[in-house]
Image: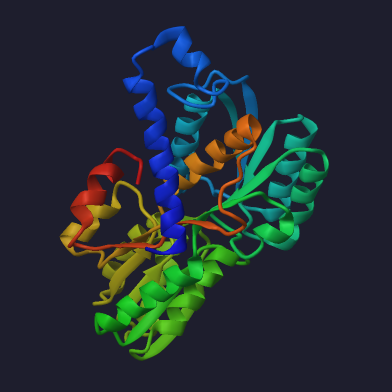
Amino acid sequence: MSRQGRRLATIALAAGLVVAVAGCSSTGGKKSEQNSGGGVAGGKASTPQITIAMITHAAPGDTFWDIIRKGAQAASAKDNVTLKYSSDPDSGKQATLIQSAIDSKVDGIAVTLPDPPAIEPAVKKAIAAGIPVVAFNAGIGAYQASGALSYFGSDETLAGKTGGKQATDDGFKHVLCVIQFQGQVQLEARCDGVKSTFTGGAYDKIYVNGSDLPSVRSTISAKLKQDPGIDFIVTLGAPIALNAIDAVKDAGSKAKVGTFDFNPQIPPKIKSGDLQWAIDQQPWLQGYEAIDSLWLYKANGNILGGGQATLTGPYLVNKGNVDLVGKFAAGGTR
C-alpha cells in the first residue's frame, strides 16, 4: 500500500474507532461524554460551534460540486460546524470571496486552488489574520507554498497518466483531450498526464466553455467532423462527458468516450457502453476531510498529511467494478 493509501486507511480506522467507542461504551450518557476528550470524539461533537467557509471554483450547474458539498455538510453536521459555501469559476472573484470570509472572521477556510497566482495572496492574508486554511481538489503542487495546513484531493498528473495508459491499452489511435476551463492547473495536469502515457498514436487537445454546455456539444461535434480520425475523447468532468457522447452521435462519429469524475448519470453510461471508463477522485471524501480536518485542528491541534497531500484518487471505474461504485453514485456520494 502506498504512503498516501496508508494515511487514508489510518484516517478511516481512527474514525471507525471513534464510532465504535461511542457505541460500545458501557458507561454511556454524561460520564461517557466527560471521558471523550472534551467533546472531540464520539457521535456529534460537543465542541463549541465554529464557522468554516468553503470556497471553490465551481461553475454553475456542475453537479460534481454537489457531491463535494454533501461531504462537507456531513462533516459539518458531525462537528458542530456552521458551513458557509460559496464559489466562482473566475479566479479573481474567488479571491474576493476569500477576502469576504476573512472580513467576516470565520474560524477556518477550505479552498480550492485552480489558479494559484491569483488565489495564493488571499490565502496568505487569511493565514496572517489567524485563520487556518486547508486546500482541496485543485492546487496539489501549490498548497504548501500558500501556507495551507493540508491538502485533500487526487494527484491529477497521475490520474491523467492512468487515463493515457488505459487509452493505449484499449487500442485507440487518436485521442482528443477536452478542457472545459482555461488556466486551471488541475485540468491542464490531467491532459498533460494523458499525453505523457498515450503511445497509441496522435494526441490533440481543445478548449471548450464549460459554463455553456450546448456550446460544448457543438464544439466537440465540429472537431470530430473536422478530424474523423479521432477515435477516443477524454473529458475532464461528468457533464462534459455526457455532452461529448451526444456530440459523437451528432457528428456521426465512431469515437468512444472516457472521462474524469462522477455524477449519478455516469455509472449507467459505463454499463451501456456509452462510456468506456471514468476516473474517480472521490469528491465526497474531499469535502468531508476538508471540513473535518479544520475541526480537528481547532478542537485538538491535529494536522493531517505529515506535510504531504492526502490522496483521494485516482480510481479507475469500468464495467468490471462499476456496480460497487454505482450504488453510492446513485445516492450522490460518489
Residue 45: % across, % down: 51, 22
Q: Who's the residue at 41% across and 58% down the image? A: 5
The colouring scheme, among rainbow, by chain, secondary structure or one colour, is rainbow
Residue positioned most to the top: 30
- Quarter assignment of residue 176: bottom left
Relative to 85, 165 lies left or right: left
Image position of 271 with respect to 194: above or below:
above
Q: Please tell me which residue is depicted at 38% across the width and 12% down the height of the picture.
A: 27
Q: Quadrant of the N terminus?
A: bottom left
- 142 vs 175, nearest the viewer: 142
Residue positioned 76% across, 29% down in the render: 104
Q: Position of residue 296 (x, y in %)?
A: 58, 35
The reply, left or right, for residue 293 in relation to residue 329 is: right
Residue 111 seen anywhere in this rendered image of the structure: yes
- State whether residue 171 is above or below residue 93: below
Q: Percent position (x, y) of residue 200?
A: 33, 89
**Residue located at (70% from left, 31% from top):** 107
Q: Nearer the viewer, residue 243 or 133?
A: 133
Q: Is residue 309 left or right of residue 10?
A: right
Q: Is residue 321 left or right of residue 53?
A: left
So how many labels did they put on this image?
Answer: 0
Which of 103 and 235 lies nearest the eye of the viewer? Answer: 103
Residue 252: % across, % down = 25, 74
**Observer-nearest of 98 and 320:** 320
Q: Is any atom of residue 63 visible in this view?
A: no
